[in-house]
Image: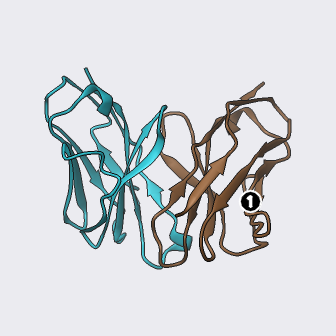
Chain colours: A brown, B cyan
Amino acid sequence: GNSVTQMEGPVTLSEEAFLTINCTYTATGYPSLFWYVQYPGEGLQLLLKATKADDKGSNKGFEATYRKETTSFHLEKGSVQVSDSAVYFCALSSGSNDYKLSFGAGTTVTVRA
Amino acid sequence: DAGVIQSPRHEVTEMGQEVTLRCKPISGHDYLFWYRQTMMRGLELLIYFNNNVPIDDSGMPEDRFSAKMPNASFSTLKIQPSEPRDSAVYFCASSQTGGSYNEQFFGPGTRLTVL
């Protein structure tokens, strides 16, 4: 079955530091990959997505590249801000007709001023 | 658009009581998902519906849990009787066939505390 493994947190960084959160997946076929973000006290919201190999998703300074050869979708941001403090979830769906998402465990990121 | 609406936002109840959580999906969305989030188990999919029909309820923990979707704009998740281990944040999410890359839109959640 489908599964997502992401690096455990919590991660604590200083403002303007570089952030990487590792995510690897197991799936059959050609999954779509997502990063969702959950700010304190809120529901999850889509941060970025990629639907095929070598696609790069980007949003709000965050980037992730769909790497089929390493089954990875690592999230990166070059210079984090305090407002980036949140829980980040990697997720996948099996394909365009599969609306069910498999989520990773989530990584808590805290950015200090 | 108002987004996914959940009620109540917070619920505190005593063990053995019935709890009903409510969700209104985004208008026009035909998929609805119920999730549970805890520190120990993370985010778990409980059940999801397509066009008001339950498609996969394999994540429902036990018979004490039930979910219904009587129409396209309303769904309930019921726990009867509730137990302290049911304490969690429950999220509802919706998505649309043919929508952007299967994106799910989440509600703000209901924080349930069972004493």
Dividing the image into 4 quarters, which one contains the N terminus of chain B?
bottom left
> In the image as oriented, which residue stretches furthest toward the top?
B115
Residue A104: image location, x then y, percent = 58, 49
Q: Secondary structure at mark 1?
A: loop
Query: Which residue shows up at 47% across the image and 73% down it?
Result: A98
Q: How many marks?
A: 1
Residue in view at x 25 percent, y 63 percent: B73
Q: Is residue A93 above or below residue A39?
A: below
Q: Seen in the image, is A72 located left or right of residue B7?
A: right
Quarter of the image for residue B114 reads: top left
Q: Quadrant of residue A79?
A: top right
A37 up-or-down from B104: above or below: above
Q: Amino acid at mark 1?
A: Ser
Q: Is residue A33 left or right of residue B30?
A: right
Q: Which residue is located at x 30 percent, y 45 percent?
A: B61
The spot of residue A42 in percent (x, y) is 48, 40
User: Would you say A21 lies left or right of B97 here?
Assistant: right
Residue B8 horizontal/vertical position (percent): 27, 38
Q: Position of residue A105 (x, y in %)?
A: 57, 43
Residue to which mark 1 is pinned: A72
User: At 48% from the left edge and 32% from the top edge, which residue is drawn?
Assistant: B40
Binning the other alpha carbons within 10 Å of mark 1 as few (below 14), some (14 to 19) or many (20 upward) gives: many
Question: Mark 1 falls within which chain?
Answer: A
Q: Nearer the viewer, residue B62 or B24?
A: B62
